[in-house]
Image (tube, rainbow, N blue to C red):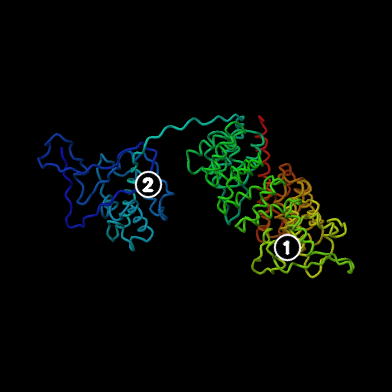
Amino acid sequence: MSRTPAPTDTSAPTPTTVPWPSAVPTDSPPTDTTAPPAQPRADTGTGAGTGPEPDADTADSPPGVDTVAGAGSSARSAPPADTADSPPGADAVAGAESSAPSAAPAEAGAQPVPGGAPAASVARTSGSGPGGVWEELVTSALLGTDRRTPPGGERGPGAAAALLDAAAAETVRRRAGLRPARAAGRPGAAPEDPRPPLPEAAARRLTMLLTDRPGTAGGGRRGSAPDLMELLPQWLATANARGFAAPPQTLPALLDAARGRTDLRPAVLKFAGPRALWLARLNPDWRFALRATPSGVTAPPGSGAAERARRLWAEGLFAERVALLATLRARDAVGARELLASTWATERAEDRLMFLDSLRTGLEAADEPFLEQALADRSRNVRATAAELLSALPRSALAARMAARAATCVSLDRTRTPPAIVVEAPHECDAGMERDGVVAKPPSGRGERSWWFGQLAEAAPLATWPARFAGRTAEEIVALPVSDGWQGELHAAWCRAAVRQRDGVWARALLGAPTAPDAGGPGAVSLAERAKLLGTLGAAERAEWVAGFIATHGLSEAFQLLGMCGVPWATPLGRAVVDALNIARDAGSYPWSFSGVMGLAERCLDPSEAGRLDALLAIPDEPEDASPGAGGYWAEAFQRLVTTLRLRAAMAEELRVGS
């Protein structure tokens, strides 16, 4: 039976029909949601013809009611639309979505909108393209119905309700608007992971770490609960050291965590194994895993490996090529260098800079010819990086040239008592200096001559100076006075040279004794420079120096230095930190000043130290000049520290089982 549309109110304006918005993919099977056009029905009376009878709701609808096409069963079963694609402010009308599933299904006809224009009529008016209707509704919700009339609606007390109903109807249409797509083949099976499975208790712990959503207590305080997400890097490092495989059900959460935190990516990808790459090929959000570990690079050398690497180098994305070069550099330095040289002349300047930076790993004397050629590069940044790498090779030709230049600027004045170092900075930056990486133009506020001198001194091999100063040792040279205020500039250049050349002898001389009065600053060597110098020392020596520094100067200046120490902290260092915190607590010091050190202690203190902290859990008596509420904060912070240490001990024990 043909159908006749319901009568309409000719006095009301006729809404303009607009195209339906773009389909939002759902998990429902593809369905054709396009409503067929209404066919006229012959007025032959009830029961005439052989077609279906008109829907009762449609027949009884008030004038002007339209139907919501496509709001059938697929709309009720479809998951919520991805709000990431919604325009800003979409949550202003998000509350209307809860009524969407109750919207009239196709077989029930249309429902009238209370207090205003019909829902579907409002939803299908205004807007000139896909998404236009929804954007108009969001705009009305943000500005208010008094300032912006909802599309197809009228001003008045019912405008707000009409807006929400229109949003509900539009939501149903967006959810139901799935369009058919070309059929694709099923992905191949995920590769097997030969590593042993994670112990059951450790698997539960991993799930807990991945689902933690840390919050803060009232007033911005962290409370006494551990921050589980901050323990995830340690957990991953231990699991990787034990050689366990990730549970398959945790792979999506692991990849999501690595997507949000780049510092987690190496550990996550190692733990997740080959199945993570299999999943990354199916989800664009996880493509970073493919860039970090390009296909075919991690495979052991064998037949076809070299050809795959050459193909990826020629055809891969930039990030894939950087990862490839870094991987090959660690395994085959000669092959990586030859691969880079094969396309060096055709690379962009910014790409050449990134590729050149990868040579820092495993830098060796065999790299010198390639780096010498890079000194003639047309990019200033590439020339500067090549010069920096060559200066890290003390036997390179560039290092010898820089040593000769620096030696002419520094001399020992033996007429003084005691002898003093005299500095005569260069008066010009010639073409040879620029070719060797010296930047001619200084930064704002820096003098030209001191800028040039600093670059020469830091690029010269440190072995230059004992010969220049009559065989004196590094400690004796550093102890010499420097005339005319050049000490800070000269010592800073030596610090950079010691870090670049990984020279522990000069690093110890420049660090000095941790108990020295000037070790806490200000001094010839800043705390930032001392932190970098610590990186050239062994873990035990580093921890011993920082422990002595804290015992003498306290924690206020030790945060940078603590970050250079290995985890877990050595026993002397850990006890020095706890003792300093206890002293600050008893003195009624401002507690929030030590929150950074306390956070480091939670992650770095040896878990065996938890028993020594039980005496610090009580709220101390507050001195008269103490910060208000400091005692309660300290007790809460120590409680969190103890709880975290015991949790770390339990995590380590769970991963030890079955290994």
Question: Around disc 1, counting alpha carbons within 10 Å, would you say few (fewer than 14), some (14 to 19), or many (20 or more)?
Answer: many
Residue appearing at x 87%, y 57% in the figure:
472
Q: Which of 307 and 548 is in front in this view?
A: 307
Residue appearing at x 29%, y 50% in the figure:
19
Q: Quadrant of residue 404?
A: bottom right
Q: In which quarter of the image is residue 152?
A: bottom left
**Whole-Å distance between the Cαs marked 2 and 1?**
67 Å
Residue appearing at x 60%, y 29% in the figure:
194
The number of callouts visible is: 2
First in sequence: mark 2 vs mark 1 = 2
Please say whether residue 193 is visible from this viewpoint.
yes
The quadrant of the rendering that contains the C terminus is top right
Of circles 2 and 1, the one toward us is 1
Question: Around disc 2, counting alpha carbons within 10 Å, would you say few (fewer than 14), some (14 to 19), or many (20 or more)?
Answer: few
Mark 1 and mark 2 in contact (Cβ < 8 Å)? no
In the image, residue 289 above or below residue 303:
below
Which x, y percent locates residue 387?
68, 55
Which x, y percent locates residue 171?
35, 47
What residue is pinned by disc 2?
98
Which x, y percent locates residue 214?
57, 48
What residue is pinned by disc 1?
454
Q: Is residue 47 left or right of residue 595?
A: left
* Amino acid type of the residue that numbered disc 2 sits on in the rendered structure: Ser
Which x, y percent locates residue 544?
79, 49
Please say whether residue 647 is visible from this viewpoint.
no
Label 2: element kind: helix
In the image as oriented, which residue stretches furthest toward the left?
Answer: 44
The quadrant of the rendering that contains the N terminus is top left
